[in-house]
Amino acid sequence: MTRLHETKAGKRAERAVAVGLVLPSVPSHIAEEHLDELRKLIETAGGEPVATIVQERQAPDPATWIGKGKAEEVQATVEEKEAGLVVFDDDLSPAQIRNLEKIISAKVVDRSGLILDIFASRARSREARTQVELAQLQYLLPRLTRQWTHLSRQAGGIGTRGVGETQLEIDRRIIRTRISRLRRELERIEKNRETQRLGRAGTFTVALVGYTNAGKSTLFNRLTAGSALAENKLFATLDAKVQKAADPMPRETVVVDTVGFVRKLPHHLVASFRSTMEEAASADLVLHLVDLSHADYLEHLEVGKQVLLDLGIPRDRVFEVFNKIDRFAGPLSRDRDTIAVSAVTGENVDVMLDMIRRREISQGRTLHLRIPIEESRSIARVHELGQVHEQSQADGHYSFLVWLPEEAIYQFSPYLSPEDRDVVDP
């Protein structure tokens, strides 16, 4: 598989030609935006896009995707620009890649291969590396034929007949075995993740989701005083990061940074990285970030909505946040339940924090408690789990007026005042 990110410092970046197919169902401006994203993907992988070629057809060509004549035009551009790589903005079949490489004197990579290359360069945790390897092997399995064609052309004779096919089947079996092991490993990792989530029971979880490069990591750092990698590149973050919120909140609050969305992300890649997004699916509040400075921010908004819908996240747990307001000058079209902020300058972040606090408070109650002084453990839990408004001591008891999250109220049912006991169902 092409590894653009292995380009060493000081060496010229690999020169690449971007190729897109425009069908009648796709408006021209949308096709151009897709190609612009492809060029950014090439740059993120460490390449240098030196030319863009667009082919308009009624339907893809079964043999070469863009047609033989257009493929020859790509070859001419490769020679003129001295490019070593051609990247297609769609997934190609193994046969199409083979046919194209017979015409084009450069490596041919499709969109999935390019994204996998980026993922491989960004994976840091055991989970991300496991997910990347699984996705790579699933991508490679149907493409194994081209790896062993030299064996199938060997001369016949005793001990040589069928060697190519035998080797191919052996290799497929090895890969399928490895895929099964990786899936089991991911299941174990997900169980550990679930244990960690259970360990955070009682905390309020805020997940940051959105299109890649929307500013999630920058906002994560502002909300947590953290140091997550924040780059102006696609897929700067692969691993879900969890950190405690830095600002005072009604209850213990953690913020989760997740992998970004992207257009035309192949389904097998979505499936491989679904466990990363499970953090968002289990969050109490999901902040859907949208890059307001992007010309097509409304389409990014719809892409994100669809992903969240696919994950089964209820709409009432999602709050839309338009980021990069410091780089936006036009009128903003948005629903009532949205806010515009700048993660870089901090503009309106305090307003967003107030919204989070209100959401937390809405999931609890303010109650009167009367706890004997000797019940020091319960008194400590009141301060740990709740937000104390009033506290006094008399007659060997502490009296509290305290806000508590709904799921914690049952722990203090013996200490509830009579009027609160009548309205609370422990």
Image (cartoon, rainbow, N blue to C red):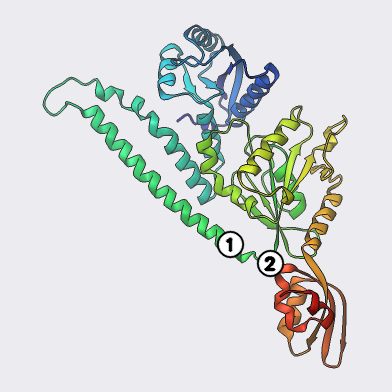
The amino acid type of the residue labelled 2 equals Gly
Can you tell which quarter of the image residue 264 is in? top right
Q: Which residue is mark 2?
A: 202
Q: Is residue 273 left or right of residue 184?
A: right
Q: Is residue 306 left or right of residue 324?
A: left
Q: Quadrant of the C terminus?
A: bottom right
**Which of marks 2 and 1 precedes in the sequence?**
1
Residue at the bottom extreme? 395
Relative image position of residue 262 (x, y in whole percent): 63, 34
Front label number (1 vs 2): 2
> In the rendering, which numbered label is found on residue 159?
none
Give the vertical position of 404 relative to 324 (above or below): below
Relative image position of residue 339 (x, y in whole percent): 83, 44
- What residue is shown at x 44% (from left), y 20% (from top)? 97
Give the vertical position of 118 relative to 225 (above or below): above
Q: Is residue 17 left or right of residue 228?
A: left
- What residue is shown at x 85% (from left), y 83% (from top)? 399
Q: Secondary structure at mark 2?
A: loop
- What residue is shown at x 74% (from left), y 38% (from top)? 290
